[in-house]
Image: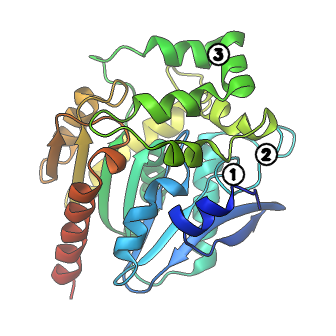
Amino acid sequence: MLDVGVALVTDLYPFEGRRHTIRGLGYHYLDEGSGPPVVMVHGNPTWSFYYRNLVARLRPNYRCIVPDHIGCGLSDKPSDSEYTYTLESRVDDLESLLDTLDIKEKINLVMHDWGGMIGMAYATRHPERIRSLTVMNTSAFHLPKAKSFPLALWVCRNTPLGALLIRGFNAFSAVASHVCVKRKPLSREVRNAYRAPYNSWKNRIATLRFVQDIPLRPGDLAYAIVSGVEEGVGAFKDTPTLACWGMKDFVFDHTFLERWEREFPHAEIHRFDDCGHYILEDAADEVESLIEDFLGNVARDNE
């Protein structure tokens, strides 16, 4: 396991991690508490640390399952010859973990950033396993027509300079720890914790591959999967859904939220006008309370 420092493990991330082996690779995850299962899926360049406070809040009443994608957090960080860094692999990995855990109840999915596409791809494979959906600044759709692909992401995705900045200087994680919060800047300790797993050229492979895997046109590796998810979300029109959205997110902005609203007109929507992409940092107490109340209502409705 990656050494991320005593302070992080004991103070900010006080959990006992577990390991699932996938094709010889270590897939780190949390399995905390007992009760209705809540599966939290992170994006890029975060890791299970993003959900630390939500896990601490929910574990007295829920079973919180939180994986680190391969190449992220405390999971192994293999080379391209050892692992295929694609959306399909991410969904397969999540499916492998949840199958191994042999969860009998329907699950409550909580998703952020790339975690939304990964989680919803899993959900469209297994709609019968899903109890509820919680989405935060994420997507289950192609780039909205009204949204331009951000220049910074284009540089990271398509140029040698972008690759050098991400793998050589940890630019993606470092910049995100500043620009993804708007209401409340992260403390140095928390910023360092987000960056800690990505402490070398080798260990930054996933943060780059995630960006390079963003599908923009037919022929891109993930494009067909995203199309399938986009077509399959109708299966969840009656599934309880909560959306908490930082409206100052320059990537997953109002155009993405509007698509969720069109596809899920029954969803409970909460906008945070002064918050950014890391909504669980900017509005931690408010969003955690909303999620806790939402899950409580879902549980009562299914008693």
Instruction: Answer left or right for 230 relative to 72.
Output: left
Dot 3: element: helix
Q: Cα distance, mark 1 to mark 3?
A: 21 Å
Among the two numbered marks 1 and 3 on one chain, the one whose residue lies closer to the N terminus: 1
**Could you tell me how many numbered marks the image carries?**
3
For discs 2 and 3, the disc positioned in front in the rendered view: 3
Among the two numbered marks 2 and 1 on one chain, the one whose residue lies closer to the N terminus: 1
Q: Which residue is mark 3?
A: 162
* Amino acid type of the residue tagged 1 in the rendering: Ile
Choose between 295 and 278: the one closer to the eye: 278
Choose between 149 and 186: the one closer to the eye: 186
Packing grade of label 3 (10 A; few <14, some 14-19, many >=20) is: many
For discs 1 and 3, the disc positioned in front in the rendered view: 3
Q: Which residue is mark 1?
A: 70
Q: Which residue is mark 2?
A: 83
Which residue is rendered at x = 16% and y = 75% of the image?
297
Quadrant of the rendered image containing residue 168? top right
- In the rendered structure, are the residues bearing label 2 and label 1 in contact, judged by CB atoms less than 8 Å apart? yes
Looking at the rendering, in which quadrant would you find the C terminus?
A: bottom left
> Does residue 80 appear in this view?
yes
Packing grade of label 1 (10 A; few <14, some 14-19, many >=20) is: many
* Amino acid type of the residue tagged 3 in the rendering: Gly
Q: Is residue 293 above or below residue 167?
A: below
Which residue is rendered at x = 34% and y = 24% of the image?
250
Where residue 264 sits: x, y (%)?
19, 48
Q: Cα distance, mark 2 to mark 1?
A: 8 Å
* Amino acid type of the residue tagged 2 in the rendering: Tyr
For discs 2 and 1, the disc positioned in front in the rendered view: 1
Instruction: Answer left or right for 20 relative to 230.
Output: right
Among the two numbered marks 2 and 3 on one chain, the one whose residue lies closer to the N terminus: 2
